[in-house]
Amino acid sequence: AQKVTQAQTEISVVEKEDVTLDCVYETRDTTYYLFWYKQPPSGELVFLIRRNSFDEQNEISGRYSWNFQKSTSSFNFTITASQVVDSAVYFCALSEGTGANSKLTFGKGITLSVRP
Amino acid sequence: DTEVTQTPKHLVMGMTNKKSLKCEQHMGHRAMYWYKQKAKKPPELMFVYSYEKLSINESVPSRFSPECPNSSLLNLHLHALQPEDSALYLCASSQTTGGSITDTQYFGPGTRLTVL
């Protein structure tokens, strides 16, 4: 069975600090997809990134960057120069396989608070 | 445009009421999902529709009845709910590829349901 572990539960930083959110996953499949979602207090899950298991290239999007390492089964997310608007719950998720019954498994989420 | 809309935003109902939640997307996606999310927990998958057919039912009690009238609409009919069913109900959609469901799921803002 697949599993996603987000060991950090709550992180609090001061604005402009850099912060890294950790995600470790377990899967037996060779084909899988990893995701990060942001859930602000309003409740909507906002898609941030999708990475397939064959693409280990790190990605940067503005202040956001992701580090995917298959050797350690990790897909970590770094926010550079954090802002108050980054305050939210962040979920890492794993989707296995390519069948019609593949499902998304979420980690427990990390609550990030950015103080002004 | 990656918009999924849900109505109503908030719903309060008694245990004997019958109500429905509505979800709509106009992205041409052929997979649609219902999730239930309790406070400080990750979303839990309830149902998946693929090409308007129910493909996954995560052993959800029969007091929750999903319906997919067409490829853009997804309903969740509620009847005889319990107070523990109070939660945020999230709808999502994704574009299937070759009958598989591994594409990015885009979520709506959710309906906050309170059962009295």
Image (spheres, rainbow, N blue to C red):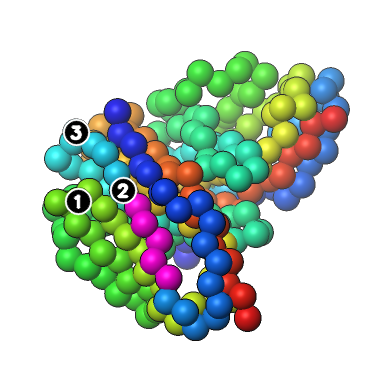
Mark whose residue sits in front, 3 or 1: 1
Q: CA distance from mark 2 to mark 3?
A: 14 Å
Q: Which residue position is annotated with label 2? A: A24
Residue B8, image x, y percentages: 73, 47
| Secondary structure that dominates the magenta span | strand
Of the residues under marks 1 and 2, which one precedes in the sequence?
2
Query: Which quadrant, please, contains the C terminus of chain B?
Result: top right
Query: Label 3 is placed on what type of residue?
Result: Arg
Residue A60, image x, y percentages: 30, 74
Of the residues under marks 3 and 1, which one precedes in the sequence?
3
Q: Residue at x 53, y 72 (%)?
A: A13
Q: CA distance from mark 3 to mark 1?
A: 14 Å
Mark 3 neighbour class, 10 Å CA radius: few under 14, some 14 to 19, many 20 or more: few
The chain that hosts pointer 2 is A
Q: Is residue A75 magenta?
A: no
Q: How many marks?
A: 3
Q: Are marks 3 and 1 in contact (CB under 8 Å)?
A: no
Q: Residue at x 63, y 39 (%)?
A: B38
Q: CA distance from mark 1 to mark 2?
A: 8 Å
Q: Which residue position is annotated with label 3? A: A28
Q: Which residue position is annotated with label 1? A: A72
Question: For the magenta stretch, what is the residue range?
Answer: A19-23
Residue B22, image x, y percentages: 65, 41
Mark 2 neighbour class, 10 Å CA radius: few under 14, some 14 to 19, many 20 or more: many
Residue B100, image x, y percentages: 28, 37
